[in-house]
Amino acid sequence: MVTTKRYDYVPIEHVLEHPLVANHRELNESKVAHYQDDILKNGLLEPLVVWERRPREYFLVGGFHRLNAIKRIRKARPGYYDRVDVRVVTGEIEEIRALNLKLNADRLDAKISDYFDTILFLNNANWSVERIAAFLDKKEAWVEEILRYVPGMDSRVRALLHEGKLSWGKAKGICRRVLQCEPGDERKVVDAALRELEGGGKPEPRYVLTPKVAQKRLRQHLERDPKATYAVSAQDLYSLLTLLAGKVDGDDERERHLERVREIFPSLVE
């Protein structure tokens, strides 16, 4: 568990960088310059956050832009900021990595792709979905989607998402198409989806659920529970038939139909 151990005033050369705890984004030079001017005028108003792995061994967790601003100040004015204010925290390495991301995300400029590697890391460290969501102040369903789609996400899709050229909804849509395609066709499906995004091809039906898969899953469900029944409305049937037809206008509409089918026919959709 991450714990604030104390606030301290330490020699700046004791604040190191750990190879597994890095800034979640490349340094923004204009932001470093802004902090340089602000710190010179007003001092370091917000302490750096450091991880004390062992007694008096400090690794930076939060404040990468501020630390680089101080280094610039010291280069121009030797003797300035020989010591800095720090908030000293303790915890396991996976918790510190999560805290590093959380501190950056709290500054409102984090992209969803910035969370991917940390969430996969925490999941591999046997953190539950509930624990990851609570620590990052996110919904469990949001974490589950990342764990479902990101491990097999095509690198081109991930790059477009990180660059802001693709929405998370569209990225999920491409991933769903890949999960539903025949083994060996994954690359072809992504290629077709990217052509559609570029306007170079006619959108193909997006089968979130095919009649063959629906029949197979319903048969398996009946084998487990022969007396199973469903209470459905006309809208429920419309959503099911729309998914089976593969003709949905837009990712948002597809998601609405998918959520309804998941709720009413849980055995049909994973």
Image (cartoon, rainbow, N blue to C red):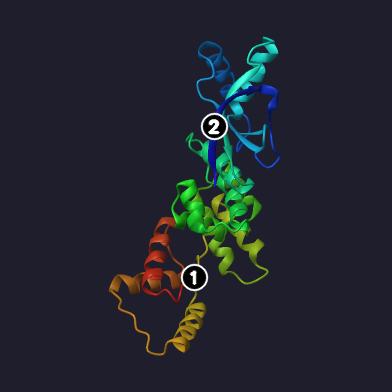
Image coordinates of residue 143 in percent, x first then y, are 50, 55
Looking at the rendered structure, the secondary structure element under dot 1 is loop
Q: Residue 6, which numbered label?
A: 2
Front residue of this view, candidates 147 and 208: 147
Tell me which amino acid carries mark 2. Answer: Arg
Query: In this rendering, is residue 194 above or below 61?
Result: below
Query: In this rendering, is residue 81 above or below 165?
Result: above
Front residue of this view, candidates 9 and 33: 9
Image quadrant in which you'd find residue 62: top right
Horizontal relation, residue 157 to residue 168: left or right:
right
The residue drawn where x is 57% and y is 44% is 114
Q: Residue 130, which numbered label?
A: none
Front residue of this view, candidates 191 and 127: 127
Image coordinates of residue 128 in percent, x first then y, are 53, 59
Q: Which of the two discs, 1 and 2, sits closer to the camera?
A: 2
Looking at the rendered structure, the secondary structure element under dot 2 is strand
Image coordinates of residue 92 in percent, x first then y, are 62, 47
Horizontal relation, residue 246 to residue 10: left or right:
left
Image coordinates of residue 211 in percent, x first then y, are 48, 78
Q: Disc 1 marks which residue?
A: 270
